[in-house]
Image: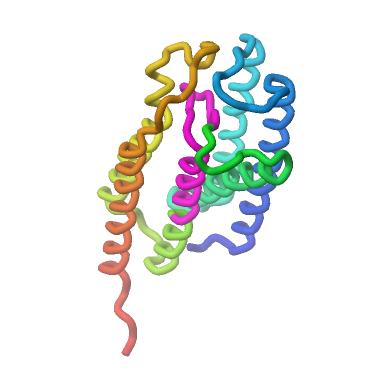
Amino acid sequence: MKTRPYIWIWVIVFAVAMGYLEAVVVIYLRKIFYPDGFGFPLVPIPGNFLAIEMGREGATLLMLLAVALLSGANRIERLAFFLLAFGLWDLVYYCFLKLLIGWPVGLRTWDLLFLLPVLWVGPVWAPCLLSLTMILLSALIWRTEARSGGGSFPPGVLRAWMVGAVLVMAAFWIDPLQHSTALHAAAYVPSRFPWPIFAAGEAAILVGVFRLRRHTALCSPAEEP
């Protein structure tokens, strides 16, 4: 990779700062809508507040994407930066929530993750594991680019990662989608997390990792004797 190393430092600083900011905003929102502590069933959110919150979430994703686009010199670098920024942002968010208000109680605590494009819910361990996966992928991409000197991923790698991403996202959506008015239904409580689908998504991502490593090994120049 031709990217100057200090850019990674500033992307990390940005992700940590964003994680803190996200935690603070969520703390304020919970004070307003959940003064006795967050939990399910969800409190109905007025239409105007719902639109504002969905806009904030969209702006957050655009900020992470913008940093990745500005930091990387090509599509592969930008992907690596986005994975790093997103994964670290989410992990830091939970760390600051735990530090500031003592929540979540544990990794099995259920959380409302996103509102876009549909409701995302799951136990805290799931987004944390996904965030760690994204950070490890960014490190792998960095290492691969450094060894191969640039280029593009073989098609099988991207296909495996796309399949994995769809399965992982589906795992967060399935239960809320079974309750079409989950966000407004006072009785909605998550039933169970479809961990087999989530595990299948993580497995597909790992398949892409192994294919990339194999491709890198085959394409790496032979070492001098």
State which quadrant residue 152 falls in: bottom left
Residue 69 appears in view:
no
Residue 9 appears in view:
yes
Foreground residue, 31 or 187? 187
Q: Quadrant of the C terminus?
A: bottom left
State which quadrant residue 59 falls in: top right
Compared across the picture, whether 224 is left or right of 84 comes to: left
**Residue pushed farthest top?**
47
Q: Position of residue 93 (x, y in %)?
A: 63, 42
What residue is shown at x 42% (from left), y 13% (from top)? Answer: 180
What residue is shown at x 57% (from left), y 49% (from top)? Answer: 88
What residue is shown at x 68% (from left), y 37% (from top)? Answer: 23
State which quadrant residue 144 falls in: bottom left
Q: Is 120 included in the stretch rendered in magenta?
A: yes
What residue is shown at x 38% (from left), y 17% (from top)? Answer: 178
Q: Which residues are magenta?
A: 111-136
Foreground residue, 29 or 21? 29
Compared across the picture, whether 155 is left or right of 110 comes to: left
